[in-house]
Image: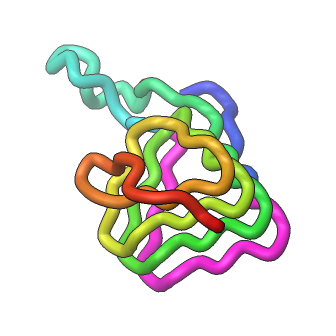
Amino acid sequence: CVATSIEIGNDCLIGYNVAIYDSDFHDINPDLRRSGHGLADDVKIGDNVFIGSNVTILKGVTIGNNAVIASGSIVTKSFPENIIIGGVPAKEIGSVH
């Protein structure tokens, strides 16, 4: 995997058992699966984000400032600031007032 980063902004609240991945860790091609070369991309979490417990955030995701991620969500794409997201896969379910 190429060098990537996971950035977490200021004043975030993060529940227990949260997993943040910046890589797939392996290729899906059976001939390359054990090579340790998977796809990778940065993860960026903005300021004042509230991440509930048991959330998984996958590679390439950016979460905007003040967002809320419901417990148990799997975040597979990026979301803007001031939004509430939840589900599997996560989708917009509200806004932060």
Residue at the bottom extreme of this rendering: 16
Q: Furthest residue to the front?
A: 97
Counting from the top left corner in percent of width and height, residue 62 is at: 62, 41
Quadrant for the C terminus, please. Answer: bottom right
Q: Residue at x 42, y 79 (%)?
A: 53
Judge from the rendering whether residue 25 lies leftward or rightward of residue 51; answer left or right.
left
Q: How is the image coloured?
A: rainbow
**Quick check: is 28 in the magenta stretch?**
no
- Using residue 54 as the reference point, say whether residue 84 is left or right of it: right
| Residue 13 quadrant | bottom right
User: In the rendered image, is residue 51 in sight?
Assistant: yes
Kindly identify the residue that appears in the image at 15 percent across and 20 percent down.
Answer: 30
Front position in the image: 44 or 69: 69
Residue placed at 68% from the left, 32% from the top? 3
Q: Is 97 displayed left or right of 60 in the figure?
A: right
Image position of 7 with respect to 42: above or below: below
Main SS of the magenta part reads loop
15 falls in the magenta region: yes
As drawn, 81 above or below 29: below
Residue 6 visible to the viewer: no
The image quadrant of residue 33 is: top left
Q: Position of residue 92 (x, y in %)?
A: 41, 49
- Which region of the structure is painted magenta? 8-22
Q: Is residue 66 above or below residue 46?
A: below
Task: Identify the residue at horizontal 45%, vertical 36% (top origin).
Answer: 77
**Quadrant of the image for the N terminus?**
top right
Farthest residue, direction right: 10
Where residue 78 sits in the image (x, y, percent)? 53, 37
Of 60 and 23, which appears nearest the observer? 60
